[in-house]
Image (cartoon, helix red, strand yellow):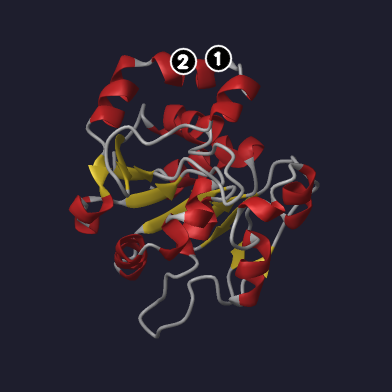
Amino acid sequence: MGRILFVYTSCSKTLTGTGTGWYLPEAAHPYYVLEKHHTVDFAAPDGPNPPVDEGSVQMFKDDESQEFLKDETVAKKFAACKKLSEVDASQYDAVFYVGGHGPVIDLASDPVNIKLATDFWRSGKITSAVCHGPAALVGVTDEAGNSIFKGRSATCFTNEEEVQVNGVQSIPFLVEDKIASLGGKFAKTEPWGVKVCVDGKLITGQNPASAKGVGEAIHAAL
């Protein structure tokens, strides 16, 4: 049994002013894989009750996603959601970044987040993310000062998927391009297909469909 930190965005608006937030199935699906076996805590830059992307609430009517919205334990975790500045990486075995367009806007450039994720990585902890969540890791470096993506296999929401959801203008950079520019060995499958990359302690998933698989990979790694 391990202890896992789920990190959510606190961003509720994209660069074009449309609503965003954390993406429902990307939290719900891995949560229900992991919570049976591990302790899961929540954190976000601004602390309690980070905003959910309402589009994801409307789009994902599967049992686990809808259960997550009604789950009293989950509601308590959101109410007690720590600020990133209050988190001590040494208390956890893994960190997982939930997607949604928000992480590209706030977590990617947040110095508190970058330091926290770097602490996880440099202490040999599982560092994981799905969809746009890997944007939260683009500033993270190893002991030598290299990007954790350099020379490692990784995936995220692809450029092609971003074009399909008309999201290119809503975020400051395309996550696929950024990972490639940092020296990552970018891997992907067809749009909306399942793709999970495990390269040592770095675990990434391509899109909402890949979130459960990321949860399973975190559990296997623990």
Q: Position of residue 155 (x, y in %)?
A: 63, 57
Residue at 32 percent across and 49 percent down: it is 45
Q: Which residue is mark 1?
A: 63
Q: Are marks 1 and 2 in contact (CB under 8 Å)?
A: yes
Q: Looking at the image, is 195 positioned above or below residue 90?
A: above
What is the quadrant of the N terminus in the image? top left
Q: Looking at the image, is 136 positioned above or below residue 216?
A: below
| Residue 80's disc number | none
Q: Quadrant of residue 77?
A: top left
Q: Position of residue 222 (x, y in %)?
A: 38, 47
Q: Which residue is mark 2?
A: 67
Q: Looking at the image, is 34 positioned above or below residue 121?
A: above
Which secondary structure, mark 1? helix
Q: Nearer the viewer, residue 165 or 92?
A: 165
Residue type, numbered disc 2: Glu
Residue type, numbered disc 1: Asp
